[in-house]
Image: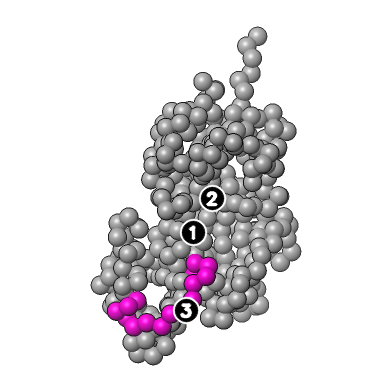
Amino acid sequence: MSAVPQRQVALLYPGDRAARDRADPAASRFAALFDAFAAVGVSAEPAVYHDDFADEVRHQLLGVQLVLVWCNPIEGGRRRDRLDALLREVVSAGVRVSAHPDAVLRLGTKDVLFDTRDLPFGSDVHRIDSLAQLTTELPQRLKHGARVLKQHRGHSGIGVWRVEQLCEGAFMVQHAQRGSLPQRMDLAALIEVLSPYFEPVCGGHLIDQAWQPRLAEGMVRAYLVEDRVAGFGVQAVNALHPHATRPGPRLYHGPELAGFQALRQRLESGWVTLLRERVGLPRERLPLLWDCDFMLGEAAADGAECFVLCEINVSSVSPFPPSAIAPLVEAAMRRLDLAPATR
């Protein structure tokens, strides 16, 4: 009787040479996930990644059946280009990857706000493809209220700017990156600040979303495993609020959190399907773990809460609520059953 092939998973996350050499699942920020895989008989191993030893990581990934990836769009000043190419290569060799680079590009960039602006949770969103368009259109929209300009890809508030018109030709500009201070500037200075985002390496365009005045009331993050809500994170987010103080901690909850069951029902009963159909993503390419950030919008006439999509995180969803671990492992097991046997 032939032995049942060992199911093998790699958890890929960034680090330097020393971090790779001393990688220890028990000391990792994913220790609970490593333990959960071990409990169901799956061999999970750390795959610490850096461009400097990409070939070494490639060899490692070709020896497993499934790779779970945590790596920001910009990590240590470097973009994910080489990593994405490597992941596509191992996918072509039969290894399953989550999130697949296609899923990252279709869900995990700010373009998704423009693509879904007419779907539930959509808002007043425009795409700006040139400095000339920015110069012409932005001042007109600012007459009706503040706007938030977002670069194509980023994290931690990098490349996200709140712009408010103070008077004709004068603007208050606030970068969302922690530690940034509001700046008063004229249109020429604003154009200079935003011009780098129109370079091809930065995506070549900006997404322009209407400011949501209720942002000071907080934000809710819905964590999903494939198309099911696996938990929530609630945070008083105020990085862009005009009277900002330090953001409060994100509090993690299970999927049954009171007050958000209507949001959960809408996500699970149709919105995820509408989303993936709109961006052209097959269900089997949905990330095993991803999240959606929602701001509070203007309440409905009947008093029902309204949520506005702020962004979708796919590249590096961490930390996440403990309630997501069991469904994540179960979903990974299903994909392992579809993967080729370990070579």
Q: Give the structural element (helix, strand or loop) at label 1.
A: loop
Q: Position of residue 303 (x, y in %)?
A: 66, 77
Depicted 290 relative to depicted 94: above or below: below
Image point (61%, 61%), residue name:
221
Closest to the observer, 85 or 210: 85
User: Could you classify mark 2 by the number of other residues whose Cα lies within 10 Å: few (under 14), some (14-19), or many (20 or more)?
Assistant: many
Residue assigned mark 1: 155
Which amino acid does the dot numbered 1 rest on? His
Q: Position of residue 59 (x, y in %)?
A: 46, 28
Work out how far the residue at label 3 is from the one at label 2, CA to CA, in angstroms: 28 Å
Callout count: 3
User: Which of label 3 and label 2 is nearer to you?
Assistant: 3
Where are the magenta residues, as a range? 176-190
Q: Earlier in the sequence, mark 3 or mark 1?
A: 1
Q: Is residue 242 visible?
A: yes
Q: Position of residue 121 (x, y in %)?
A: 53, 66
| Furthest residue in direction bottom, as rendered | 167
Closest to the observer, 113 or 110: 110
Image point (57%, 77%), residue name:
244
User: Which of label 3 and label 1 is nearer to you?
Assistant: 3
Which amino acid does the dot numbered 2 rest on? Ser
Residue assigned mark 2: 316
Work out how far the residue at label 2 is from the one at label 1, CA to CA, in angstroms: 9 Å
Q: Give the structural element (helix, strand or loop) at label 3.
A: loop
| Callout 2 touching callout 1 (CB < 8 Å) | yes
| Left or right: 65 in relation to 76 | right
- Image quadrant assignment for residue 248: bottom right
Q: Is residue 328 visible?
A: no
State the quadrant of the N terminus: top right
User: Could you classify mark 1 by the number of other residues whose Cα lies within 10 Å: few (under 14), some (14-19), or many (20 or more)?
Assistant: some
